[in-house]
């Protein structure tokens, strides 16, 4: 008998030691709720096999940034409402101070980490009070939102961001992450405040990421894929008001880019500046290859398909001179695009603060469904260039296929493309002129 009891006791003890723990983040009205969570995290009790719960029914004050330690088998569940400070200067002081972790919510690594919001429409919102920042045109010391960094096997689901101040989700250095059913609502209620600048919805760094069923209303890239990203799949999503499904910018300041295997499909782009977009800077280097955008419906978009290897910051001076290098691009496919081009005369997008606008393309009419602004000879990898010289075959493979578009003014649809920058069939007549699909574009 005693032996049986001892065995049971041991069993109980061991199962207790590895039992799942739940920490309900405490709240005090009018107080900052971050220190209570930080103290619990510092105890180390909740770094493993735990749920960290922001409880439904509670309105939390996240008056200072939260930085999580490395976590293993941890779920952070946001079922209550979370609020940033509503004072701009309070946030600016924190962001400007040394020791600011970079984002208001920062993950620093770990394995099997789930960041989950709520499916209850009334709860689980994270309110950053961005309206005041937008109305004031305030761009100084803006915090990034969520840095889901260095996580292996992660999930971000059902999160809801209300009026975020700046950048939203970033996944740099992470791998095998599933990001789905998230909502970003960065929509201004006033005409005063233009939509937030430099606020990508999802900044995809890392490898093996699946983004799906996300809903983004913002004022910058819906998706931006950065250097180092590989095997990125973005699908079944809605993007409104922003700057497109973007790769880059790559190669800034002479850096060497590396982006491979990106598939973006089944996305609605509404009232956006760009649809599918690639951007790299003169003077950069490296390679972006095997990138597909397909099944894209666009409604009231100014530049549905836009590739530039001459990206630059117009506010800092004229287009830099050709330095002889750029990020190579290879195997790009734009397939099954259908929609309308915003060519309303005099239309100015909200992020335009200069004349000409930063997005102005010299010579463009506004009726272009595709603009390929390529850097001579970089649209093929050096090895392929060499091979094609030896074999006499064109090997570029930048193609737009099954593109159906109409302008809002009923003007004929046009393209911009310089045939001396690319020799292979791009799927349409490569010129500055009417959009005429070629055989490759109708396959
Ligand atoms: C966490 O749980 C797993 C299995 O569920 C167990 O193997 C592991 O020892 C636990 N870790 C800690 C630190 O309790
Ligand atoms: C952490 O666990 C220890 C031991 O179980 C306990 O004494 C302590 O109160 C816990 N701390 C927190 C913050 O939960
Ligand atoms: C990963 O974490 C979840 C909770 O977030 C847990 O249910 C699951 O058992 C963990 N998986 C492994 C392999 O430990
Ligand atoms: C939670 O926050 C959202 C966004 O600010 C708000 O619309 C909602 O009413 C809040 N929920 C409650 C119960 O106050
Ligand atoms: C290209 O990327 C896709 C994912 O979009 C992947 O399935 C395929 O294997 C890649 N092809 C090559 C040649 O790398
Ligand atoms: C480009 O080169 C021309 C001629 O050498 C020079 O006048 C111009 O200032 C250069 N532009 C830039 C942005 O450096
Ligand atoms: C086309 O590209 C070539 C090579 O870069 C350049 O010399 C030429 O000026 C470009 N033509 C137009 C019309 O932009």
Image: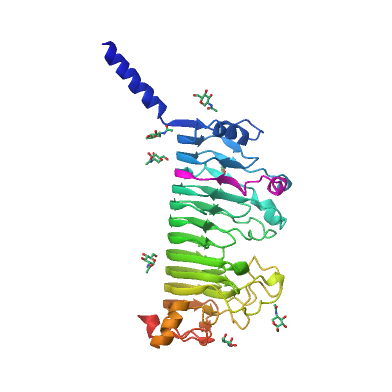
Horizontally, residue 441 falls left or right of residue 319, namely left
Vertical order, 372 against 194 (above or below): below
* Span highlighted in magenta in the image: 91-112
Q: Quarter of the image holding residue 281? A: bottom right
Q: Nearer the viewer, residue 246 or 407?
A: 246
Whether residue 12 is situated above or below residue 370 in the rendered picture: above
Q: Position of residue 346 (x, y in %)?
A: 65, 76
- Residue 426 shows in this picture: no
Q: Residue at x 72, y 44 (%)?
A: 90
Question: Which of the two residues, 408 or 331, is positioned nearer the viewer here?
Answer: 331
Furthest-left residue in this view: 1
Residue at 31%, 19% (x, y): give it. Answer: 8
Is residue 379 part of the magenta span, yes or no?
A: no
The location of residue 53, given as percent across then percent down, is 50, 35
Side of 12 relative to 163 (left or right) = left
Q: Quadrant of the C terminus?
A: bottom left
Count of number-bearing discs: 0
Q: Residue 373 is drawn in which quadrant?
A: bottom right
């Amino acid at each position: 008998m005693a032996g049986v009891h001892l065995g049971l006791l041991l069993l109980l003890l061991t199962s207790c030691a590895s039992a799942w723990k739940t920490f309900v983040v405490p709240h005090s009205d009018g107080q900052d709720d971050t220190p209570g969570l930080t103290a619990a995290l510092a105890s180390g009790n909740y770094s493993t096999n735990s749920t960290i719960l922001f409880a439904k029914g509670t309105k939390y004050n996240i008056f200072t940034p939260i930085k999580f330690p490395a976590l293993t088998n941890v779920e952070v569940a946001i079922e209550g409402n979370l609020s940033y400070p509503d004072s701009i200067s309070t946030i600016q002081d924190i962001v400007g101070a040394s020791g600011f972790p970079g984002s208001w919510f920062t993950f620093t690594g770990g394995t099997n980490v789930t960041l989950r919001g709520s499916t209850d429409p009334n709860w689980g919102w994270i309110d950053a009070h961005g309206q005041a920042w937008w109305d004031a045109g305030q761009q100084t010391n803006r915090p990034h939102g969520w840095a889901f960094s260095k996580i292996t096997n992660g999930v971000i689901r059902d999160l809801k961001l209300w009026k975020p101040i700046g950048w939203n989700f970033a996944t740099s250095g992470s791998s095998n992450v599933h990001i789905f059913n998230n909502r970003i609502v960065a929509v201004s209620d006033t005409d005063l405040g233009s939509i937030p600048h430099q606020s990508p919805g999802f900044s995809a760094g890392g490898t093996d990421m699946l983004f799906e069923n996300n809903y983004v209303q913002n004022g910058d890239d819906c998706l931006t894929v950065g250097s180092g990203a590989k095997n990125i799949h973005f699908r079944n999503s809605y993007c409104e008001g922003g700057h497109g499904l973007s790769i880059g910018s790559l190669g800034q300041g002479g850096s060497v880019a590396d982006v491979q295997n990106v598939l973006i499909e089944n996305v609605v782009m509404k009232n956006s500046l760009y649809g599918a977009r690639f951007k790299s800077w003169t003077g950069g280097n490296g390679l972006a290859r095997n990138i597909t955008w397909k099944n894209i419906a666009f409604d009231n978009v100014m530049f549905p398909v836009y590739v530039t290897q001459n990206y630059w910051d117009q506010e800092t001076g004229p287009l830099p001179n050709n330095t002889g290098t750029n990020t190579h691009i290879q195997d790009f496919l734009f397939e099954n695009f259908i929609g309308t081009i915003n060519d309303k005369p005099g239309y100015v997008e909200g992020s335009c603060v200069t004349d000409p606008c930063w997005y102005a393309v010299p010579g463009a009419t506004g009726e272009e469904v595709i603009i390929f602004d390529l850097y001579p000879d970089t649209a093929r990898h050096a090895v392929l260039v060499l091979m094609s010289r030896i074999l006499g075959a064109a090997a570029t493979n930048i193609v737009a296929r099954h593109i159906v578009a109409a302008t809002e003014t009923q003007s004929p649809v046009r393209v911009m493309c310089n045939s001396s920058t690319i020799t292979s069939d791009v799927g349409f007549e490569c010129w500055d002129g009417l959009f005429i699909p070629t055989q490759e574009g109708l396959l």
